[in-house]
Amino acid sequence: MSFFEEIHRHLGVLRDVVGEVDAGALPTTVAEARDADVMRVIRESTRVIEALASLRIAASGVLAARSRREQGHDGAAAGEGHRSAVSLVQEIAGTTRTEAAKQVRLGESLLDGANLLGGARAPSADDEADAADAVDAGDDAGTGTASRVREPWHASLGRAQLAGTLSAAQHHAILHGLGDPPAPGDDAVDAEFAEAWSLAASQLTEEAAHRTVEELAAAARTIRDRLDPVGAEQRFAARFDGRSFRMWKDTRGVSHGHLIFDDESAAFLRSVFDSALRPRRGGPRFVADDEKAAAAELRDDPRTNTQLEFDLLLDILRAGVLADAKAVHGTRQAGVRIVVTDHAWQTSHDGTPAVAHLEDGLAALPAWVAAQRACDGGTRTVWVDGAGEPLRLGREQRLFSAGQRLTLALRDGGCRWRGCDRPASMCEAHHIDPYSEGGRTDTDRGILLCRFHHMHLHHHRWRITREGHGDFVLHPPPGKGAPIVLTPRLALTYAWADIPPPLPRFRTSPGAAARRTRPAGRAAIPRREPLHRESARDRRAHDRS
């Protein structure tokens, strides 16, 4: 089926649902439709929008290629009185500059993937605005004849978008999250990195059908940082060097402030606010009577959340520490947990770059940050296998202990309900086997759910099952659809990649190790097939957090 035939097919479905109406009557017409038809309208409209978006993106890439700096005033954009293709696309599309720049970058990647940029792409004004998205599609060398153009690592993303497998937003999330592979200058190492990035792009494309855009972006960043720990340290250092605070008064005499955080400081302050305001943000429910009273008082407070955050920040600044932390934070005081595998811990101590991650948000940090924080924060060891599955289970009791919740946080990363992004600190531990029916309070029979989805599960008769240490499966109420496999957060799939025993593809290639350069990419990318199950003794490893 041709491009426009496909669009007409979707338009036909929309016409059957909505009918021939004026644009002004659309809200009324859709409001009278059944729920199923409303969702059908959204689904079919999205297909049309994505198809046309691909066409517009391709045209934006062509416009950028015809507006390069070396073309001067003869370029397409300059001929229309614009400095760059981004400016021209912004005017034509009536969109923001950020959105126009994204269209141009994706358009250039489509042309690059189709080898229509004619080899190495010269820097453009748009590249200078976002150097991380510039792509080098250089030639293979050493043939002595006309060299063929190597397919760029992101070519599969462009093909997937044009085929309708990836949306433009998913394409951009993966492309931007992975960034460009490092290029140390050694042809063999450069080729290994390019191959690794290409494999990562293909794997993330396969995941796109059942992952949110945000989760794809987070997983892409996790893969990038695992494959390139040197670059991860450099990015961490750049954000740390960029931290700043300034105050000023406007013309009305109102004082303003502007903060730019480094990674660790942002995580700490976010933890403070989340802990203090979790009763108002749908966090875990309070159990003790005094906690319930404090939570009710906070919910009834007339101040907005932003006003409460401001007052709390000023309290911290005035006092240095809160006089009564439990009154504000409840059962969990604010703090930052950094998770690092034993392998990364030892590697960092040997002076080789390695990566840790935050428990909430899964953002990557250099492993030495965990070692630094261990000096005044201490460590806690959790035994898990290569999929983050706990190997030491807690004793039976009615409620999950703090240690068990930590283990669940390391395994689940947050709410496991499909598409939910709530972090572990905002979740409750759910017994998949009801405690009242003899269920055990063990970590292999528990799962993290945010308060909303936990209540939704109980109130609407959903249930979660699990066979042994297999996947958690969410079962809808009768007649509401098929069971759903609750896959772990995609970033965690890669975060546990160095837990022994490693699959062969996890091992750094000898050549790259001998050169003492950044690790070869292909060796570190895990595939999505299930990890081979070994005995507990063979597969367990320390995780310090």
Image: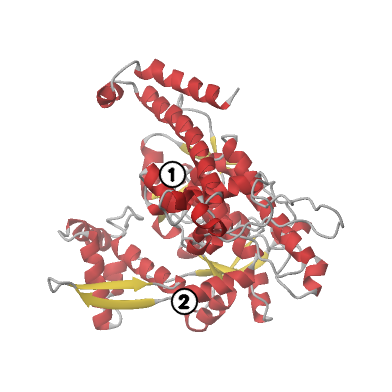
348 left or right of 58 in image: right
245 left or right of 28 in image: right
Q: Nearer the viewer, residue 515 or 129?
A: 129
Q: Nearer the viewer, residue 476 or 222?
A: 222
Give the image's coloring scheme: secondary structure
**Residue at x 34% of width, y 21% of height:** 34
Q: Which structural element holds mark 2?
A: helix
Outermost residue to the front: 74
Whether residue 86 is visible here, answered yes or no, is yes
Residue 512 vs 206, above or below: the answer is: below
- Determine which quarter of the picture holds residue 190: bottom right
Q: Callout 1: few (<14), some (14-19), or many (20+) C-alpha neighbours within 10 Å?
A: few
**Residue at x 75% of width, y 76% of height:** 516
Q: Position of residue 526 (x, y in %)?
A: 69, 54
Q: Which amino acid type is marked by label 1?
A: Ser
The dot on residue 436 is 1
Q: Nearer the viewer, residue 368 or 28?
A: 28
Location of the N terminus by quadrant is top right
Q: Callout 2: few (<14), some (14-19), or many (20+) C-alpha neighbours within 10 Å?
A: some
Q: Position of residue 51 (x, y in %)?
A: 51, 33
Q: Position of residue 278 (x, y in %)?
A: 32, 59
**Residue at x 54% of width, y 77% of height:** 369
Mark toward the viewer: 2 or 1: 2
The dot on residue 240 is 2
Q: Which amino acid type is marked by label 2?
A: Phe
- Determine which quarter of the picture holds residue 269: bottom left
- Determine which quarter of the picture holds residue 21: top left
